[in-house]
Image (spheres, helix red, strand yellow):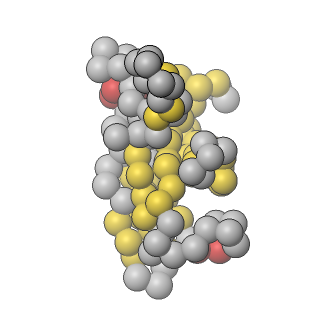
């Protein structure tokens, strides 16, 4: 379940939402975030064939980028509390996405997942 925008009387326009099942993004799978008491959140995702790096985006309720992390070669990172804007309080639910990169260009983007700030 990703962030979606609905207009009255119309089908949903997907904004940073689910990837179509037949798309390359369906192969970039987000794993469930894990809280690391006193250290932050562990985020991880599946590797994408041909990707050289990954970039992680944390998305606010208004669909804006709150934090962009990377690029990095690993398929996991620890999001520390000090990396979040002061406006993000414990208990907040944010969206997150991962972009697989090759040569600095986006190969594919994951569907949007939800993460609760500990």
**Quadrant (top left, top right, bottom left, bottom right) of the C terminus:** bottom left
Q: Is residue 2 left or right of residue 98?
A: left
Residue 24 visible within the image: no
State the residue in front, 24 or 20: 20
Please determine whether, in this image, residue 109 is positioned above or below residue 80: above
- Residue 9: image quadrant is top left
Residue 49 location in percent, x, y? 40, 26
Q: Which residue occupies 65% across, 74% down? A: 82
**Quadrant (top left, top right, bottom left, bottom right) of the N terminus:** top left
Residue 111 location in percent, x, y? 41, 34
Residue 35 location in percent, x, y? 38, 72
State the residue in front, 67 or 94: 94
State the residue in front, 34 or 88: 88
Q: Which residue occupies 68% across, 69% down? A: 87
Q: Which residue occupies 51% across, 56% down? A: 94
The outermost residue toward the front is 9
Residue 45 visible within the image: yes
Please determine whether, in this image, residue 76 is positioned above or below residue 99: below
Residue 84 location in percent, x, y? 64, 66
């Amino acid at each position: 379940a990703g962030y979606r925008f609905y207009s009255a009387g119309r089908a949903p326009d997907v904004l940073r939402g689910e990837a179509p099942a037949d798309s390359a993004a369906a192969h970039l799978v987000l794993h469930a975030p894990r809280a690391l008491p006193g250290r932050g959140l562990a985020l991880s995702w599946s590797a994408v064939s041909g990707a050289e790096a990954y970039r992680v985006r944390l998305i606010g309720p208004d669909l804006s980028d709150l934090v962009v992390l990377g690029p990095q070669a690993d398929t996991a990172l620890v999001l520390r509390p000090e990396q979040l804007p002061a406006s993000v309080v414990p208990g907040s639910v944010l969206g997150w996405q991962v972009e697989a990169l090759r040569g600095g260009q986006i190969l594919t983007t994951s569907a949007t997942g939800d993460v609760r700030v500990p």
